[in-house]
Amino acid sequence: MCSDMYRTPRTLLVCDRSSFLDEKNRVSSQVEQLHFNHKVSVLLPGCSSTPSNLNLVMNTISNFYLIRKLPIHELLNPDLQSAINQGVVYGLSFGTRIDEDTCVALVPKGRLILSLDKDSYELLGIEGKPSRFNHRTCSRFVVSVDLTDSSMAPGGWGHTRLLTGLRSHLQLQTDFLLSHHSGSRATLQPLLSRYDWSEHRPEVSCRHLTDMACPALQSCDCHSLLEWFGAVEANISCENSSSSFLSSFTCPEPNNTLSHALSISICGLLLPHDVQRLIQELSRLSWSPGLP
């Protein structure tokens, strides 16, 4: 590996074992912190078809929009203000790389986040903090603005300053993904009417698995279970030898063989409340003891 390659940001894997029946489980609070989800994978051991109620939830996951070349100052438009204040609109720049490109996110509770290189940051003229995605020198910055603050009301000093920076100084525009809670589409219509946009549904795919090795849940540590699940999701064989060139991964032991299982993947711009609905429906399903 080239010695000049910069180090990746530190990562942390936290595994929390709990039950849906436990009122103090932290699943809901953890999901609410994940504002943007690209993919959710579900493995249903012992199932050969999708349960009807789960299928209904998957088919009613929120659609999202792709707006081409959206000027970011449009996110300060009064048309969007009420929806932003209610925390029902989510947005994310599309096709950008957070370590190299200018990236934009609109998260719940009305916070606008900009990840900028040094030149763009200085042009914008709004105070920010150094990014975690820096190289040896401080070359990237993150600007976070609370759009619900009183100074960000249309005509306020904060609103005027940011609008001038985005529209006149930086002139930032990007392809932008936008989504909303159900019943909020009317608030987006004025914005959509001014630009080239397309509506998209999350993509759902199912894969039927047979004679699959499955680790015994009570005897498997969290990291091994996660690695096994990733292998199943990626369609990697778990029946390999230690001398295999392509993969030496095997199912953790002890394990059992499932006659059939169903692997489901949902891809798109997935909002926390849709993931919550999916988890709630999964918690209502009945499972045999010891299955993951």
Image (cartoon, rainbow, N blue to C red):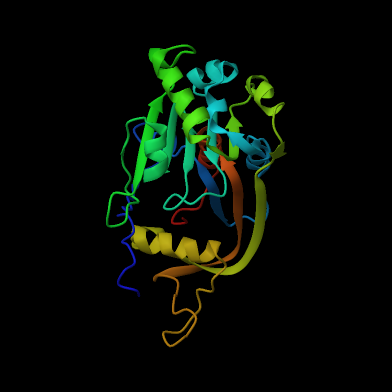
Compared across the picture, whether 283 is left or right of 226 comes to right
The residue nearer to you, when weighing 22 against 222, is: 222
Q: Determine the image quadrant of residue 119.
A: top left
Q: How many marks?
A: 0
The residue nearer to you, when weighing 272 against 21, is: 272
Compared across the picture, whether 149 is left or right of 235 comes to left
User: What residue is drawn where x is 45% and y is 65%?
Assistant: 228
User: What residue is drawn where x is 59% and y is 39%?
Assistant: 176
Q: Is residue 21 visible?
A: no
Compared across the picture, whether 149 is left or right of 237 comes to left
x%, y% of residue 49? 68, 53
x%, y% of residue 74? 57, 26
Q: As drawn, which residue projects farthest toward the bottom?
A: 243
Q: Determine the image quadrant of residue 64.
A: top right
User: What residue is drawn where x is 27% and y is 57%?
Assistant: 136
x%, y% of residue 186? 67, 20
User: What residue is drawn where x is 56% and y is 16%?
Assistant: 78
The residue nearer to you, when weighing 207 against 215, is: 207
